[in-house]
Amino acid sequence: MAHILVTGALGQIGSELVPALQAQYGRENVVTLDMKSQPAGFAARHEVAKLPAKAVLARVIKKHRIDTVYHLVSLLSATGEKDPSYTWYLNVQSLKDVLDLAVEHKLKIFWPSSIAAFGPTTPHDQTPQHTVLAPTTMYGVTKAAGELLCQYYFLKYGVDVRSVRYPGVISAEALPGGGTTDYAVAIFYEVLKTGQYECYLKPDSMLPMIYMADAMRATIQLMEADPQQLTIRTSYNLAGVSFTPAELVSEIQQHLPLKVSYKSDSRQAIADSWPNSIDDSVARKDWGWRHEYDLPRLTTTMLEKLRVKLGVK
Ligand SMILES: NC(=O)c1ccc[n+]([C@@H]2O[C@H](COP(=O)([O-])OP(=O)(O)OC[C@H]3O[C@@H](n4cnc5c(N)ncnc54)[C@H](O)[C@@H]3O)[C@@H](O)[C@H]2O)c1
């Protein structure tokens, strides 16, 4: 039976990955770690620690007899630009600590990369699996470096490390933590609360996105896959659905009235450097990945969930 540790467990992804792992492997077998205290009843066992802190991680791994780590701690794209040095330190050092401990304790690792690992010189349409990784944000630099570090530890030490390049993740539980695709979550809250939204990206800025349920299915499916089938140890391209702010607005307007204005900020340049769409055929071939949520289904589901959460009729 897996003994799992999830770091950064209280963020947008951890908030839904932890319940998914608990359902799959048993509540007692999922330990969470974050620099914040857990909300009541979230996890059976929670550790409060600020990474990087290799000695603390080592103690937690021994204490709970951990064999698998989902390492989610990271600063994201927009927040990362406010303190690039700390972003490098946190994102890369904490990953290296996890990989070193994986060698020592024979751990299996999941670590998410991002479409931010790509850059302005990467082909933007149907971005291939093997392509230019020349990101222009510090967050992207840490993802490109992290991918190479993962592959290095696999080749040199045989660490079973697995990764996907998440697109922008859309979800109704925790709010996103300072990324460039956050508008595609915020707009759902605003349509229900005020019927208005000011978008920080241009109406035609197409970006790859994925609904949380698909992202969680992909994560667990990759971790369950036969290692012999895996041909990528940097990070797998993963696609859900690509859309522009204008397309999302028009889909939401099928359900509710919404007034949107557009005023680009610094996140526009980041969005412009990222792909429009992703070719994830290698993930489909190697471990059978298939997305289930298209734009209409994602929109209906977000509105249903947020109506309940916000108490809106
Ligand atoms: N959310 C997305 O759209 C998206 C897209 C691509 C990749 N990813 C990747 O997925 C992972 C999780 O992202 P997320 O969106 O859940 O992030 P988030 O910002 O929502 O959550 C990060 C969590 O880590 C915790 N944390 C931050 N610094 C810490 C530190 N020094 N020590 C301990 N805990 C710390 C925070 O308290 C928070 O709970 C990251 O690696 C991110 O790069 C996310």
Image: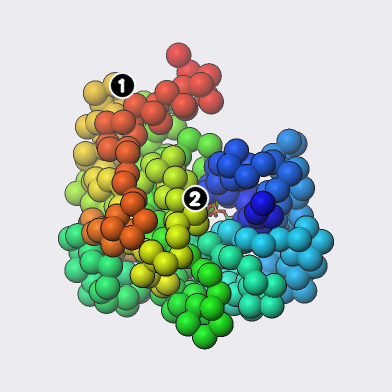
Decide: few, some or many residues near mark 2? Use Cα within 10 Å; few <14, some 14-19, many ≥20. Answer: some
* Front position in the image: 287 or 177: 287
The local secondary structure at tag 2 comes to: helix
Mark 2 residue CB less than 8 A from any atom of ligand 1:
no
Mark 1 residue CB less than 8 A from any atom of ligand 1:
no
* Front position in the image: 85 or 218: 218
**Residue depicted at 67% across the width and 51% down the height:** 1
**Residue depicted at 51% across the width and 21% down the height:** 308
Ligand 1's quadrant is bottom right
Q: Are marks 2 and 1 in contact (CB under 8 Å)?
A: no
Amino acid at circle 1? Leu
Mark sitting on residue 220:
2
Alpha carbon separation for disc pair 2 and 1? 34 Å
**Residue depicted at 37% across the width and 70% down the height:** 232
Can you name the residue that lies furthest to the bottom here?
Answer: 156
Decide: few, some or many residues near mark 1? Use Cα within 10 Å; few <14, some 14-19, many ≥20. Answer: few
Residue 14 can be seen in this image: yes
Residue 58 relative to residue 11: left or right: right
**Residue depicted at 28% across the width and 58% down the height:** 285
Q: Position of residue 5 (x, y in %)?
A: 67, 57
Q: Position of residue 277 (x, y in %)?
A: 23, 56
Mark sitting on residue 16:
none
* Front position in the image: 18 or 122: 18
Q: Position of residue 130 (x, y in %)?
A: 27, 73
When the figure is inspected, residue 9 is found, relative to residue 236, above or below; the finding is above
* First reached walking from the N terminus: tag 2 or tag 1: 2
- Name the quadrant containing residue 67: bottom right
Amino acid at circle 2? Ile
Name the residue tied to disc 1.
256
